[in-house]
Amino acid sequence: MADEIGSPYHGPAGGAATIKAIDDVLAEQGLAESGRPDLLHMNQHDGFVCPSCAWPEPRRHRSDEHLFCENGSKAFAWEATTRRCTPEFFAAHTVAELTSWGDYELELEGRLTHPMAYDPASDKYTPIVWEEAFARIGAALQSLDRASQAEFYTSGRTSNEAAFLYQLFGREFGTNNFPDCSNMCHEATSVGLPVSIGIGKGTVCLEDFDLADAIFIFGQNPGTNSPRMMSRLRNASRRGAVIVSFNPFRERALEVFAAPEDHQEVATGQGTPISRRLLQVRVGGDVAALKGIMKALLAMDEAPTVTGRNRVLDWDFIREHTAGLESLLADLRATSWDAIVRVSGLSQLQLEEIAQFYAAAHATVFVYGMGITQHRRGTETVQCLVNLALLRGNIGRAGAGICPVRGHSNVQGDRSMGIWEKPPADMLDRLRDAFGFEPPRDRGHDTVVALEAMVRGEARAFIGLGGNFATAVPDTPIIHAAMRRLDLTVQVSTKLNRGHLVHGRQAFILPCLGRTERDFQATGVQRVTVEDSMSVVKSSGGINPPASEHLLSEPAIVAGIARATLGQRSKVAWEWLVADYSRIRDKIAAVFPLFEGYNERLKDPDGFTLANTASERIWNTPSGRANFVVFSGLDEDEPEITADIVWLTTMRSHDQFNTTLYSRSDRYRGIKDERMVLFVGESAMQRQGFAAGDLVDVETVLTDRVERVVKGFRVQPYQLPDGCCGAYFPEANPLMPLYLYDAMSHTPSAKGIPVRLRRTSVPAS
Ligand SMILES: Nc1nc2c(c(=O)[nH]1)N[C@H]1C(S)=C(S)[C@@H](COP(=O)(O)OP(=O)(O)OC[C@H]3O[C@@H](n4cnc5c(=O)[nH]c(N)nc54)[C@H](O)[C@@H]3O)O[C@H]1N2
Ligand SMILES: Nc1nc2c(c(=O)[nH]1)N[C@H]1C(S)=C(S)[C@@H](COP(=O)(O)OP(=O)(O)OC[C@H]3O[C@@H](n4cnc5c(=O)[nH]c(N)nc54)[C@H](O)[C@@H]3O)O[C@H]1N2
Ligand SMILES: [Mo]
């Protein structure tokens, strides 16, 4: 029985199971023969950048070093698959029928092969030739009353070249409406860090992981979401660095990890312990934990010793480089340990011990992910984390710094290319000078604002450059209804997904090349460029033939739509740019000074690193200093936690990439072939009288009048802090209210949803 409902994972993360998982996914996608040799090209100089996460690879690595991981292999197999989703498939299924399919089944159909247009008479997608698709899309966009009625969404797999052309098109068309996946992800970083340290990106490089004495990991699950980071953590742990993780879930890879390339660890099943402490902070309790550590640190700093004072704050750094310390100290003094303990779910002793680890470490790296950013006060939480770093001067020196782990492999690059609803004036000036048109100056729509415009019926057209917008966003039932009222939906995609089924009056699926495929244009084979989580820009070239002869590259598709929409009035030589991507890069260099000499600098096969002021201790803030920013109060997630409210967090399984499901299992959390699982802590189980395997309905506790219920989750008892539960994204997205977002960054609160649980009224089928 215990096995049927899933059991926790006892071996180390990684190890033999990883090797088997890679073999399994290659075989499933028809790549048993070709897959392994192809994977050797991943992240290598002559090959393609992994289409999965944004974790960087080492510079000047040995050429025989494997630079792929389990989940990168899944992403590769998912794209390089031999399965095809052809016009015959679409002829056999109406959209209404496909809507009843699961997300897993939809993508399993394989690569899209032909451009398709929705035919309302048959409720089916039918093939269309590219030029006609472009012409109809262009006509629909031209028919809008205002350019701002169109939403230009980008997902973070898009190359720099495609992203640059896309923003160029949107702006020449007349709008800054560029909602992107980053708005649901690290926007709190992009908004919070500039106030604190004057730049919206992380300050560390890979080598800092080898020099750090301590590594603190907040709300990030590297064993699943950036597995190549595990080798850094493993090395750090082995040389005695203190790793501390803050996570409501005891994620297996944060406990112990066996490197798949270490034959001994694989053979013995003995991994390397990773976290010295894994603190099961409550969902939304990170600010309280951070304040507790800072409060303990302050007490240590003030404690008299025989030799005078035992200074643990870096006073020289604070005096020379920072502003705002007094307010921070006043806030810490005014915050009681009782409150800290209650909200964090951690004891004073636990937090004091972490403060001691921190004080003993000469250099500390602060890693964080979605557990920090996807909260109602995510931006301020990021800033609170920076406060802790600044107290000991842990920014801008070796082995220390802030490490936001970005999601999609080029999400950071897309922003660098101007996929941004609030473009700086100087960027727009340079865009005008480079192309000779006047770009719009008003603020455009981010994801939340775009969704609101759809719900109000103001938005009329949606174009998605990659991704699965309709599935990834909050309040999915409400948004689906709104998107079905749009005049036009266009999706540039590699695989069939729910976004194609949630369509407007006119709808198009435009299939594109993936990163693993060779990209031929008029002047020959092209390479694209991407920027990783540590601001390293490098080039990527596909190795496989295209999945279908009818595919176009993303830059070619954007250019096709642009030409058809703007016609004679365009000032951009679209075809000329697409014929040779180095021409696009020259234009990028003209618009973005950080990319000066772009093509030249790419000659280094390791790519180049974009300048980062904060890592040089240059603080690009109005005061010219790094700022301590006070987080008022402790509760990241109001309203008050009352007895029957449980905080729901939503996260990824080990077998998914966002809305793409590689399987329905979640190895490290002991879940086999199911997704409608609700992880519930023992105390909540007892209070509610639930037993393992019970079916429950989850209802969002709200302040508006909309009912948000998802029925039929199976209860999985789990070791979690009191008052917390967890479910998978995107199954739980109907529970996530659109209005529940961080006011500063508009990041939806995917990691803090107040819910009530009750036994299911209608048995789930
Ligand atoms: N294989 C794979 N790789 C991926 C992705 C994928 O889906 N699959 N997605 C990519 C993308 S776009 C992104 S943004 C990243 C996401 O990577 P992560 O940031 O790791 O994202 P999540 O899995 O959503 O959640 C991270 C962790 O936060 C914890 N958590 C939840 N709530 C809280 C909280 O309140 N406080 C704290 N401290 N922790 C909390 C969860 O238990 C989980 O371990 O990964 C990228 N890489
Ligand atoms: N509840 C909840 N919601 C969340 C999150 C959460 O943690 N919890 N996380 C949020 C985060 S961090 C993010 S980043 C978003 C993700 O939102 P998105 O980035 O929009 O979603 P993905 O699932 O990554 O997109 C998958 C689709 O991308 C297409 N695709 C894959 N490769 C390519 C390519 O090379 N080119 C093109 N054009 N298309 C391609 C395929 O058709 C595939 O179906 O979701 C957010 N939503
Ligand atoms: Mo993300």
Image (spheres, rainbow, N blue to C red):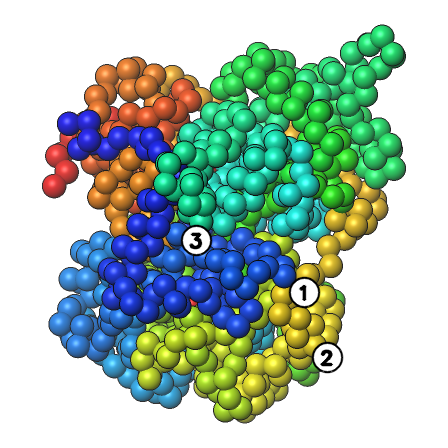
Sequence-first tag of 2 and 3: 3
Mark 2 is on which residue type?
Answer: Asp
Q: Is residue 515 depicted above or below 155 in this figure? A: below
Q: Which residue is mark 3?
A: 69
Quadrant occupied by the C terminus: top left
Q: Is residue 195 left or right of residue 175?
A: right
Rounded to the nearest whole Å, what is the CA distance between mark 1 and mark 3?
Answer: 23 Å
Classify 10 Å Cα crowding around label 3: few (below 14), some (14-19), many (20 and above): many
Residue 613 location (% of width, % of height): 76, 53
Number of numbered markers: 3
Q: Which residue is mark 2?
A: 433
Q: Is residue 431 visible?
A: no
Q: Is residue 527 visible?
A: yes
Is the C-beta separation of discs 2 and 1 under 8 Å? no
Please name the residue shown 28% across and 15% down the image. 686
Q: Which residue is mark 1?
A: 608
Q: Nearer the viewer, residue 626 or 603?
A: 603
Residue 3 location (% of width, % of height): 19, 31
Distance from mark 2 CB to nearest ligand 2 atom below 8 Å = no
Mark 3 is on which residue type?
Answer: Cys
Please name the residue shown 23% across and 40% down the image. 672
* Disc number for residue 26: none
